[in-house]
Amino acid sequence: MYITSKTERRASRHASQQIRSHFSAFRRSQLCGSERSCSRIILLLGSSECGKRLQLMSIQLHNLKMNSIKEIYGSGKPAWWRRHPMALQIGTTISCNIAYFTDAGFTRKAATLSMILLGGASLYCFFNRQRKINMRDLIVITGCNSGLGYSLAMHCRAKGATVLAGVREISALPNSIAAMESLKKKGIIVHQLDITNEQSTRDFRDKVTSLLKERQLTLRALVNNAGVMVFGEFEWQTSNLAEHQVNVNLLGTMRITREMMPILRENHSRIIVISSHCADEPLPGVSIYGATKAALQAWITAVRVEVDKYNIEVVSFIPGGFITESNIMKRTRLHFDEMLEYMPDEAKRFYGNYFTRYAEYFSSVSAVCPGNEGNVKVLTEPKIYKIFDNALLDVYPSAVYRYESWRYFFYRILFKTTSTWMRDRLVQRFVAMPPWKTNEQ
């Protein structure tokens, strides 16, 4: 039905203007006062063709309102609560304390306490601010074949960042294929990287440079995660095994960081180095690994001061133990075979079946690693990701971010506070190695 009457056209224009004004008010206020605007729009609707179109507009307005409600209250809590839970909890605690002291007659103490608590809360909120990340931010992570590197790549991609994952090997092994397919399926860019090889690190740097230019990205962080661990007493480990740990854990991290320094300076990026509790408390059985991590921690401490003037931030992240969810032990059986092959006859006679029991103990642990099962596991502990987010996003980062279980925390405190004799006994209890027995015993 067409509107032909001059009066009808005038009325239609008037109704349209009113509807547009209420629609604009609705868009500005979103939820506040929108019910009244929608009701007045419905009253203006008629039975004409114009009225039918206005009815459709009212339905669209209702859907917009419902989508807004779902977006804001989707988690069941108001947005203001989800954004500032800690500030609200602190504010509630302060209010309750002030009310209590005031009611008890301690007005001056209440005022002093309120100033202290408010100042502390303000400082807490100021120094715990975090940046946001999106697709324009590039996060580079090394050692993403499995374990922590693989999990962090998935996590950063889920948060919306562009992720470049460096992998040691792209082979036909089942676990390697599964890892590559999983990473690529999530939109993660995969590139081969051997941090012990100069040319490989240069190629990786060129890949980062091309990504930044082609996609107009900003390098947010370089996460140095690649590392290797060899279990076994110091005397057993061959020169090849010792040098490999030093080359990967220490020199390799230095090598890739040095190659990336021009890009890090240009983008004012953050360097996150995955360290270990073995850097603080060296443990028997991983003496060389602990030495590389301790040296790495010393390097981090010095470099943090060196590059601070270039607006580059350096932090250390200690994630705790998760050896059964990574490939770090997948070559354990081969390592012990190499140790036995190069072990002198005198050492074989001295250690006897102790070496065999030691090797069997760790080989049984490595048997449950994902590299031997043909699959890749994602770390399931949410607190690891929360602490990593702090290391990645804090506006004012700490020097060290640490995740550890209560058992780790308890033993770490005891290691630092007890005597040397007691500390050594606690270490033996902590690592729970096979007991030493000679052939005669």
Image: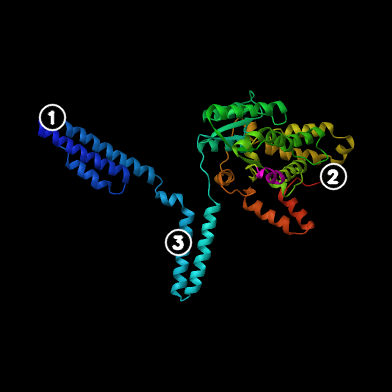
Say whether residue 123 is magenta.
no
Q: Secondary structure at mark 3?
A: helix
Disc 2 residue type (three-letter): Thr
User: Can you give x and y, in whole percent of width and height, for residue 205 in the image?
Assistant: 64, 29
Q: Residues within 10 Å of mark 2 (few under 14, many from 20)?
A: few
Task: State which quadrant residue 95 falls in.
Answer: bottom left
Q: Nearer the viewer, residue 73 or 208?
A: 208
| Label 2, label 1: how far apart the Cα atoms are | 106 Å
Residue 30 at least partly seen: no
Disc 3 residue type (three-letter): Thr
Tag of residue 92: 3
Tag of residue 438: 2
Task: State which quadrant residue 18 falls in.
Answer: top left
Disc 1 residue type (three-letter): Ile
Residue wearing tag 1: 3
Tag of residue 41: none
The residue stretch that appears in magenta: 301-309
